[in-house]
Amino acid sequence: MFRYYSIIGIGKIGMTEMTDYSPDDWVVLKVKEGKGTFPFYKVLAGWRGGPWSATWRINSGITLVFDHEDEVHFYGESGSVYRCPKEGYGLSGIQEDIYNELRKKQEFNGQIFLMPEDTDWSEVKY
């Protein structure tokens, strides 16, 4: 576990426990809630073996990104960090099912998209 400090409200500092995830497969989803709204971005992550077999998670929303040589670190609103290997970009079977279900939901109204694999993650406005 990692710890980081964040500002909560004005003048208050809180300490948050960070959960660290290292998925096998991952994509970034761009979500736009409706006309005139700004998009937000989420990691859809999946694991293929061991105790995480056929497991998936969606992070709370990307707030910060560090692009390293072999992996990208996505920090979420909840304080979690997803350490995603660059060669793992793509949907596994269960992730593809989840993505298709999200696209069908009425509250997204077709406004959820996969970001391209060659995206420069440091240039996206989170």
Image (cartoon, rainbow, N blue to C red):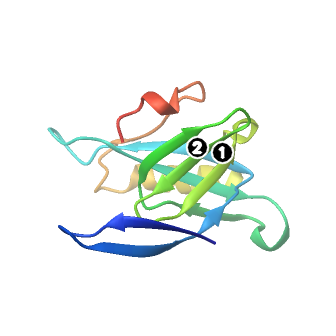
Task: Give SS at disc 2.
Answer: strand
Q: Left or right: 110 with respect to 57?
A: left
Q: Where is residue 24 in the image (x, y as percent from the top left)?
A: 75, 52
Image location (x, y in percent) of residue 91 = 65, 45
Quadrant the N terminus occupies: bottom right
* Left or right for 10, reference 112: left
Q: Which of marks 2 and 1 is nearer the N terminus?
A: 2
Residue type at tag 2: Val
Q: In which quarter of the image is residue 68?
A: top right
Q: What residue does disc 1 label?
A: 91
Q: Is residue 36 above or below residue 15?
A: above
Residue 52 got which mark?
Answer: none
Position above or below: 34 against 95: above
Image side of residue 75 versus residue 32, left or right: right
Q: Which residue is drawn at 28% across and 56% down?
A: 107
Task: Tell me the distance, in whole angstroms, between the alpha carbons under discs 2 and 1.
Answer: 7 Å
Q: Which secondary structure lies at badge 1? A: loop
The mark total stands at: 2
What residue is at 56 percent from the left and 53 percent from the top? 44
Mark 2, residue position: 27
| Dots 2, 1 in contact, CB < 8 A | yes
What residue is shown at x 43% (from left), y 28% (from top)?
123
In the depicted view, which residue is nearer to us: 1 or 63?
Answer: 1
Where in the figure is residue 92, as x and y percent of width and height? 70, 49
Quarter the C terminus occupies: top left
Picture residue at 45% right of the left edge, 74% below the top:
16
Question: Mark 1 belongs to which amino acid?
Answer: Leu
On screen, residue 71 versus residue 119, left or right, reads right
Mark 2 or 1, closer to the camera: 2
Estimate how packed mark 1 is, as few (under 14), some (14 to 19) or many (20 or more) residues with alpha carbons within 10 Å.
Answer: some
Residue reaching furthest to the left: 36
Q: Residues within 10 Å of mark 2 (few under 14, many from 20)?
A: many
